[in-house]
Amino acid sequence: MKMKRVKSPFKRQQGRILVGLTLIISQLNLLAQDGNAGIQEANQKVRSYFDSGTNLMYAVGAILGLIGAVKVYQKWNSGDPDTGKVAAAWFGSCVFLVVVVTVIRSFFAV
């Protein structure tokens, strides 16, 4: 008795799988190259916003300093005994904000 040879249905699909894997690998290579370009572009955009961000931080510090000056003035006029503490706290926080912005600008200047 002669046995019939059964053709495997997977032979035809092996070629398709190989072609599919080749296409996927080539696309991954292209994505890696585009990823590096994207990272460089994002780096340049963030650096372009840096000066505006530091100026914004200076403006916020100035506004907070004015609010603190008004609060200290109100406490001083009402005769509160802890006016010196409040004034020192507001002055210290404004100085800290300016120092932090200056240090960040010196480290990460464009």
Image: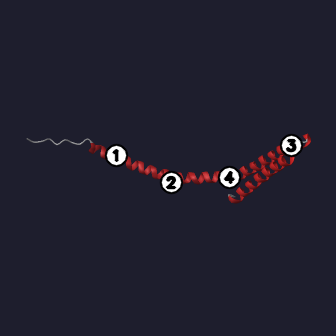
| Residue 52 rendering spot, x and y as whole percentages | 72, 50
Upstream in the sequence, badge 1 or badge 4? 1
Res 17 label: 1
- At mark 2, the secondary structure is helix
Name the residue located 91 percent from the left edge and 42 percent from the top edge. 79
Determine the secondary structure under disc 3.
Answer: helix
Instruction: Say whether marks 2 and 4 touch (CB < 8 Å).
Output: no
Q: Mark 1 vs mark 3: which is more N-terminal?
A: 1
Say which quadrant the C terminus sits in: bottom right
In the rendered view, how is the structure colored?
A: secondary structure
Determine which residue is flagged by label 4: 48
Query: Circle 3 is placed at which residue position?
Result: 70
Disc 4 to disc 3, how far (Cα)?
35 Å
Circle 4 residues within 10 Å: few <14, some 14–19, many ≥20: few
- Residue closer to the observer: 39 or 101: 101
Q: Residue at x 30, y 46 (%)?
A: 14
Residue type, label 4? Ser
Residue at which label 2 appears: 33
- Among the 4 quarters of the image, the one containing residue 106: bottom right
N-terminal of the two: label 2 or label 4? Answer: 2
In this view, which residue lies farthest toward the bottom? 106
- The numbered mark, 1 or 2, whose residue comes first in the sequence reads 1
Which mark sits nearer the N-terminus, 3 or 2? 2
